[in-house]
Amino acid sequence: MKMRSHCPINFSLEHFGDKWTLLIIRDLMFKDKRHYNEFFESNENVSTSVLGDRLKQLEESGIIKKEADSVKKSRIKYSLTPKGIALLPLMIEMIVWGGTFDTDTEANQDFLDQANNHRELLVSSTREQLEKDHLPS
C-alpha cells in the first residue's frame, strides 16, 4: 500500500479510514457477522462493489483474513487477525463517543456503562472472546 505520508493518523486512515471499513470491523467485532451476505444485509445499505472492495482492502492490510467456511465449504468466512483485534479499544471509544452524543443512539446502555466505568475489564474480556472466535487455536 502506497502511503501519502507516514504520519500516524494518515497511516491509520489509509488502513481503516472510511465508514464502510469501520462498519465491517464493527460487524466482525460486535455483531458476530462473518460472511459477505451478513455484511451486505447491514442497515447502512453498502453497495456490493464497495463491500467487495473494502473486504479486499482489509484483507490486503492484514486486518482481516478469509477462508473457506467449515460448515459450507463453498462459502467464504471472514475473521479478524491480531492486527484487526488490536482496533478494539478504538472501536469501543467510538461507540462511547457516538452513544454519548447521538440522542437516538442504538448503543446498549449496559455496554456504555461498562465502557465508561470498567473499560479495562470490557476490553480484556472482549479481546479474549474475539481471539477465541477469530484466531486459530
Image (tube, grey):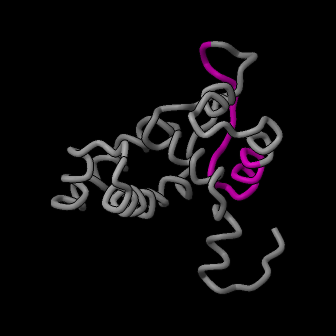
Q: Nearer the viewer, residue 125 or 12?
A: 12
Q: Which of 91 and 130 is in front in this view?
A: 91
Rendered-image quadrant of the N terminus: bottom right
**Residue 33 rendering spot, x and y as whole percentages:** 53, 31
Q: In the rendered structure, does residue 29 fall within the stretch colored magenta? A: no
Residue 96 as seen in the image, left or right of residue 76: left
Image coords of residue 67 (percent x, y): 69, 32
User: How many badges with numbers are in the image?
Assistant: 0
> Looking at the image, which residue is at 47% across and 43% down?
29
Tell me if 87 is positioned left or right of 8 in this view: left
Q: Residue 64 in the image: state x and y as whole percent.
A: 63, 47
Where does the image place residue 127, in percent across and percent down from the top left?
37, 50
- Is residue 42 shown above or below 93? above
Q: Is residue 118 left or right of residue 68?
A: left
Position of residue 46 in the picture relative to residue 91 (left or right):
right
Query: In the rendered view, would you say 110 is above or below 67?
Result: below
Quadrant hosting residue 11: bottom right
Q: Quadrant location of residue 2? A: bottom right
Q: Give the range drawn in magenta.
A: 54-71
Q: Residue furthest front?
A: 103
Q: Nearer the viewer, residue 21 or 75?
A: 21
Name the residue located 76 percent from the left edge and 38 percent from the top edge: 47
Q: In this view, does 38 lie above or below 57?
A: above
Residue visible at 70% across and 40% down in the picture: 46
| Residue 61 is inside the magenta segment | yes
Q: Residue at x 40, y 58 (%)?
A: 98
